[in-house]
């Protein structure tokens, strides 16, 4: 009997697109091969909103999907690294978000630099209907520019 990992890319991608975002994040933890496939694939997710809170050099993230509100304490991911954020934003790049927000303050400039670098290196720009950024001092200093 063939295993899940022996499937070709097309059916695997179709399966991932049918899974909810939380399920995809859980599948990444199954084994290295599946994690690498998910990280290297481009597929649509059911993410609708992403709220990023920059806390020094780490991130708290709240993600919403039409099927589920993903939360764990104060956010879906608390004290995540820029590598974790990069994976979440890569998974969202083929989906159109209704809302994308970033919340920070001037003391958290390092995390904002990491976010700017992640967004610059996306293979495709994030699509969102609404973008909001709180942290007026950083906006005044021109650290994150709209493109």
Image (spheres, rainbow, N blue to C red):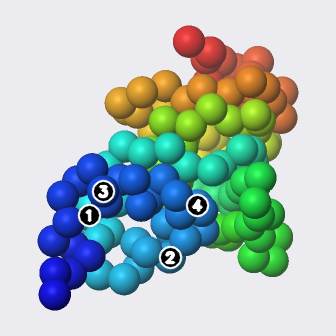
Q: Residue at x 60, y 62 (%)?
A: 20
Residue 30 rendering spot, x and y as whole percentages: 36, 83
Q: Residue at x 65, y 49 (%)?
A: 47
For mark 4, does the 10 Å Cα neighbourhood hold few (<14), some (14 to 19), or many (20 or more) residues? many
Task: Mark 2 and mark 3 in contact? Answer it, CB < 8 Å.
Answer: no
Task: Give the Cα separation between the discs numbered 2 and 3.
Answer: 19 Å
Q: Which residue is mark 3?
A: 11
Task: Mark 1 and mark 3 in contact? Answer it, CB < 8 Å.
Answer: no
Image quadrant holding the C terminus, namely top right
Find numbered disc 1 in the image and state the secondary structure of the residue it sits on.
helix
For mark 3, does the 10 Å Cα neighbourhood hold few (<14), some (14 to 19), or many (20 or more) residues? few
Q: Which residue is mark 2?
A: 26
Does 67 appear above or below 115?
below
Q: Residue at x 61, y 17 (%)?
A: 145
Which callout, 4 or 3, points to the residue nearer the camera? 3
Dot label at residue 99: none
Dot label at residue 21: 4
Q: Earlier in the sequence, mark 4 or mark 3?
A: 3
From the viewer's side, name the closer residue of 9 and 128: 9
Find numbered disc 4 in the image and state the secondary structure of the residue it sits on.
helix
Dot label at residue 36: 1
Task: Mark 1 and mark 2 in contact? Answer it, CB < 8 Å.
Answer: no
From the viewer's side, name the closer residue of 142 and 117: 117
Task: Give the Cα separation between the discs numbered 4 and 1.
Answer: 16 Å
Q: Earlier in the sequence, mark 1 or mark 2?
A: 2
Q: Residue at x 82, y 70 (%)?
A: 74
């Amino acid at each position: 009997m063939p295993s899940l990992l022996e499937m070709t890319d097309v059916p695997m991608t179709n399966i991932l697109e049918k899974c909810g975002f939380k399920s995809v994040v859980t599948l990444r933890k199954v084994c290295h091969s599946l994690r690498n496939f998910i990280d290297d694939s481009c597929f649509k997710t059911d993410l609708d909103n992403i709220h990023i809170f920059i806390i020094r050099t780490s991130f708290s993230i709240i993600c919403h999907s039409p099927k589920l509100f993903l939360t764990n304490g104060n956010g879906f991911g608390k004290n995540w690294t820029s590598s974790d954020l990069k994976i979440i934003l890569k998974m969202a790049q083929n989906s159109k978000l209704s809302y994308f927000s970033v919340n920070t303050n001037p003391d958290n400039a390092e995390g904002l630099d990491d976010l700017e670098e992640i967004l610059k290196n996306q293979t495709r720009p994030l699509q969102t209907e609404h973008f909001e950024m709180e942290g007026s001092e950083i906006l005044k200093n021109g650290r994150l520019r709209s493109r």
